[in-house]
Amino acid sequence: MTLCTNRPEGFGPLSNLYPRILTSCFLDTILIPLCTWLYLLSLALIFALPTRRAVATTNPSLDLDTLANDHAVKPLARHRRKLRLVLTVLYYGLLLAQTLMCVLEIVRLSLAHLGVGLLPFTFVTLLVAGALRVTRGLKGRMVGGWRWATVGVWIALAVANGVKVAEEVKEGAGTRKGSKYPEADEITDVAVMVGVYAVLMVLEVVAMRF
């Protein structure tokens, strides 16, 4: 399978048509997939590191103030659970939306006979991030490091796709006009994905407080 085809700017890192512009082929086959590789590598290192589990201790002298305020704490706990549920639903909804956006971009690139590079590797990131969220880091095996790794990959993907948008804007929104995937459409699609990655990053950071 050809990774990139019919891309007049060339297939190397720098464009043959525009000065100091990265090619879309380089972005689709190297820069964006690199985010996934680094994410998987960081998770493997976190998983391999020995974990220290907290040892539960029993204190015979209970905090009477805490017991007395137990009824006041319960409404706050219920509020936190509701907020956690809302954040979780929003997070998975955005993961689904991002998956569909990636499918849309890949399908339209394929229909335009431009090649899809290694963009399908992004699905690995979305799947792994969702699985870690469901299992809470494989039931605590990866402690909290996996959350920071996921925050990092959302930032990396947002930046990498942001670079892609910037390069496409420099090429001009009128490029590939009349094709099955005009440049203007791809700019819009990728810009939406940048926004979704940014929101996923924020939600991941907020989830650390719950």
Image: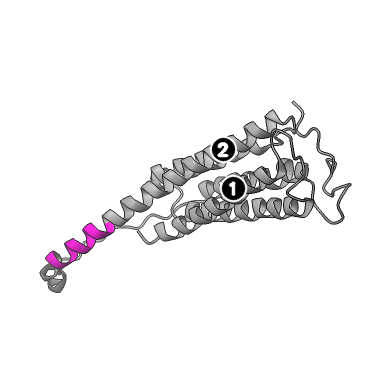
**Residue range corresponding to the magenta coloring:** 71-80
Which quarter of the figure is the C terminus placed in? bottom left
Mark 2 is surrounded, within 10 Å at the Cα level, by few (under 14), some (14 to 19) or many (20 or more) other residues, namely some
Magenta segment's dominant SS is helix
Colouring method of the image: one colour
Residue beneath the point at 65% across and 43% down? 185
- Circle 1: element type: helix
| Callout 2 amino acid | Phe
- Circle 2: element type: helix
Please tell me whether residue 144 belongs to the stretch shown in magenta: no
Residue beneath the point at 85% across and 41% down? 10
Question: CA–CA distance between discs 2 and 1?
Answer: 12 Å
Query: Residue 125's quadrant in the figure?
Result: top right
- Which disc is residue 123 wearing? 2
Task: Give the residue at mark 1.
Answer: 39
Residue 34 in the figure: left or right of residue 206: right
Mark 1 is surrounded, within 10 Å at the Cα level, by few (under 14), some (14 to 19) or many (20 or more) other residues, namely many
**Residue with the most extreme front position:** 178
Residue 137 in view: no
Residue 190 in the figure: left or right of residue 14: left
Residue 197 in view: yes
First in residue order: circle 2 vs circle 1: 1
Viewer-proximal residue, 81 or 104?
104
